[in-house]
Image (cartoon, helix red, strand yellow):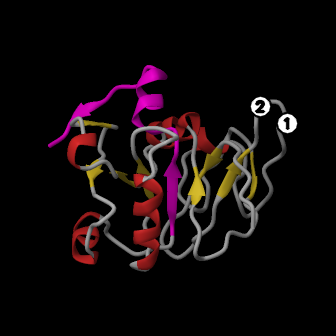
Amino acid sequence: MKMHHVSLIAVASAGVGALCWAAEPASPVAAPAGCCAAKVACPMGAAKAVCAMGAVPAPAVPAHKYGLIDTRALQALMQAKVPAVVLDARAGKWDDGKRIPGAKALAPAATADEAAALIPAKDALVIVYCTNLKCPASAMLAEQLLGFGYTNILKYPDGIESWISAGNAVEAAK
């Protein structure tokens, strides 16, 4: 199945496991019941600011795949304080010590125990990133986490370079 890359807003919480896809500004749609309703909190945990953008139900995503999120949607999730674990997949010489605020480092070769120490539940929203579109580390980490049984994973393919280019703050690795 080919995934469509739209501004994706993952709004999921324990027991729901659903995604809401944000409509592009050029093609706004009414938010259907059961996903997000305009100006009210999503049943899956997203705040009013996220749902007010307009959303449609996500197409079915195979259990073995992960979703994509872009810079604007990641900013909205963070601003809305949607509970998520953000993981920086860069390791070794590629890790410059800069992180998206709140992100923790987890290398693609991480063990199940290392992942469990950072991710509170198998269905927790997890966002993985690395350097940029050319960096394979976030895809490798996403696949590793899927193999460990995590079910709610989004990849931020643009990575830390795009995050910084968009004028967003970073923090030093802890």
Circle 2 crowding by C-alpha within 10 Å: few under 14, some 14–19, many from 20: few
Q: Quadrant of the N terminus?
A: bottom right
Task: Give the vertical position of 49 relative to 46 (above or below).
Answer: above
The three-letter code of the residue at mark 1 reads Ser
Q: Which residue is mark 2?
A: 25
Q: Nearer the viewer, residue 41 or 26?
A: 26
Number of marks in the rendered image: 2
As measured in the structure, the alpha-carbon distance from the residue carrying label 2 to the one carrying label 1 is 5 Å
Q: Give the magenta-colored segment's residue range.
A: 152-174
Q: In percent of the image, x 83 and y 30: which residue is there?
A: 26
Residue 81 position in % (x across, y down) = 43, 44
Q: Quadrant of residue 159 in the image?
A: top left
Pointer 2 with pointer 1, Cβ within 8 A = yes
Q: Is residue 125 visible?
A: no
Tell me, for residue 27, which label it has, or none: 1
Residue 171: say if magenta. yes
Residue 67: say if magenta. no
Circle 1 crowding by C-alpha within 10 Å: few under 14, some 14–19, many from 20: few
Task: Give the vertical position of 69 relative to 97 (above or below).
Answer: below
Q: Is residue 153 left or right of residue 107?
A: right
Residue 20 position in % (x across, y down) = 67, 55
Q: In percent of the image, x 54 and y 62: which residue is there?
A: 12
* Helix, strand or loop at mark 2: loop
Q: Is residue 163 left or right of residue 19?
A: left
Q: Quadrant of residue 110 in the image?
A: bottom left
Q: Is residue 78 visible?
A: yes
Q: In percent of the image, x 51 and y 67: which residue is there?
A: 152
Residue 112 position in % (x across, y down) = 28, 76
Task: Give the vertical position of 38 relative to 66 (above or below).
Answer: above
* Helix, strand or loop at mark 1: loop
The three-letter code of the residue at mark 2 reads Pro
Residue 119 position in % (x across, y down) = 32, 66
